[in-house]
Image (spheres, rainbow, N blue to C red):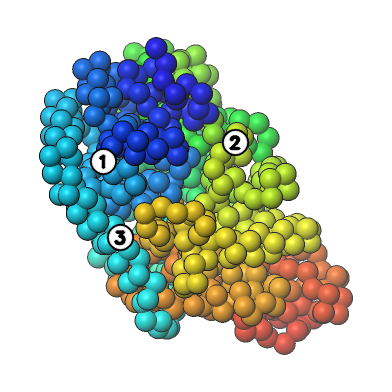
Amino acid sequence: MSNRLKEEHSLYLQQHAENPVDWFPWSDEAFEKARDENKLLIVSIGYSSCHWCHVMEHNVFEHDDAAALMNRHFVSVKVDREERPDVDHIYMDAVQMITGGGGWPLNVFVLPDGRPFYGGTYFPKEQWMSLIERLAITYKERPELIRSTAEEIQNKITRNEEILQTNKPREDDVNNLSVRLLKQWEANFDSEHGGEKGAPKFPMPARLSAVYNAAISQNHTAIKNQTLFTLKQMAAGGIYDQVGGGFARYAVDSQWRVPHFEKMLYDNAQLLPLYAKAASIEQDEVFKMVLNESFSFLIREMQIEPGLFASAIDADSEGVEGKFYTWTYQDFKKVIPDEQWADFFNVIKPGNWDGTNVLYYNSGEMDQRIHDDQGFQAALNKVKSNLLSERNKRVRPVRDEKAITSWNAMLAASLFESYKYVKDTRFIEVALEIVNRVKQQWETKGHLPRILNYDSATGMLDDYAYTVLAFYSAYEITHNQEWLNLAQTIFSKTLEVYDVDKSLLNYYPASEQMFARKTEWMDTVIPSSNALIANVAFDLGYVLKNTGYTQKGEKMLQTMTELMQKHPLMLGAWMDAAHNSKEKIYVNIGKSYSVDKVRSLFAGENIYPDILPSKELDNNEIMACKGNTCFKPVNTIDDAIKLVKP
């Protein structure tokens, strides 16, 4: 018998629709029932491609005895963290305070007023049943104990938010911050395998981007090469799909070899411009290959229809993690009989992982062969094509087809940025399809929704931040004034809806009440939405000559400076915002100049400015600026390059 989740759009919620648990979606109805019946709530949070979420459903929520206990004593609520990241963020904070750790599934025990008092991640069935029985008894016999615990957690979260917002504003030289960042990176760098030491290994694109940019600006060749080595090692490992392109969410080992096989839109979107920039600066065929294969993967496997991209592809198929992606020795050899390719991809008879083979290669061997053997890359492409054709006959992992506004806008912004490095017009075409979809939603609804392809909650701060960034990027690439106008309109709306008269913006609309305010200030795998707002405030402040926007960005940076001094590696997006506030290059051009020519000549010097039209310059004038500091107009591109060349 189905429960209430049957009517929900979310794939994750639908996956629990046949459970015997009397699940509610996140709703007023659930909390009203809890108040009316004086029951606690279980808020269980996950997402469709979460392996351990599936495991807990199978081991716990599908069982009648566990469900009966939950239904008797609790009101149970299922939440898709990608659909309601506001709920996930604030309850994750609470669980991390309680247990010192977090993850998904996130299971939180909550009072009828929404305040959490206990929680954890995965629970085996017997432990789960014992826990919920004890909590139900405690609430019946000693409710004041649970309420006092909830109040303590609420006060801690509120106090942490207040401390963050009242950080004494301070400034620091961008160079000093960059030096701190590079020192932290160097101390944590895994010289053997790339990335940071230890396992599991996450790509962390915002962190990699900040380190790469800082190394370039500081002329630190050794660390620049460390980031390039990291990109090479990621591309060589099993975390990268050697057959179909695209990156998995993370590697479970320290060598990038064995992935947790789920693929997320946000990882692949953010990694595109990193590989594009490396391909342009280094003129390296491996970086170009990864960029093109990853783009092809996104179009082939994650595009729902033009302008809409799915959020994730599951790790499991036919109930087995990685089954779609791995190869037995025999199956590989049936497709590719030549033993050299089994050797190249480390395919062995007993398997290199759990009795089967994850494909990976030695990055040094790839570099040598792609450089020395003219026919190697064509042969490699043929091998991959044959393997892909064979793999496409398998049962595919489930794709979560919700098109999240922020992740789609992120992809659009990344494609526009990637175009600046490699001039692939396909990137512009796809990015424009996305921003037009987002624009359509904005004009239809009068606000940005969280999800583009079904009715959903209003967007969160990251949805607005990435949309403004994507619209500004569309303007910078196309010089179509409409995109700049939209970027300004939505940025103004963002300040109106999410600003709580503090330095940093609230993550969810300020008018919506939860048990505490929540500011998203730290990067995770996805950059901090406040850092994105600060960054785009400088862009719009510059191009619109709006000092209020610039001052807002400066105030946000100053509030974060102390944390950036202590933890620069955790705040990559803030580090990039600080760098851009002083060092980003804008080039204003008169009508006589070809945008493509200006872009190409600057790129020849490994400089990638924002190129903007100017009505204030004469037709043959060109003016370069760093941050808000502008040089006198000149009459040749070469002269403009000399002004900003390091």
Instruction: Name the front one of labels 1 and 2.
Output: 1
Position in image of residue 62 (x %, y %):
29, 18
Position in image of residue 623 (x %, y %):
73, 79
**Residue 109: numbered disc:** 1
Considering only vertical position in the picture, is 311 above or below 449?
Answer: above
- Residue under the image location 44 percent in, 78 percent down: 558
Rendering quarter of residue 298: top right
The C terminus sits in image quarter: bottom right
Pick out the residue farthest to the front: 36
The N terminus sits in image quarter: top left
- Residue under the image location 51 percent in, 23 percent down: 7
Q: Earlier in the sequence, mark 2 or mark 3?
A: 3
Q: Is residue 87 visible?
A: yes
Position in image of residue 52 (x %, y %):
29, 31
Residue type for callout 1: Phe
Label 3: how many Cα within 10 Å (few below 14, some 14–19, many 20+): many
- Residue under the image location 64 percent in, 80 percent down: 547
Is 637 in front, or is 164?
164
**Residue 157: numbered disc:** 3
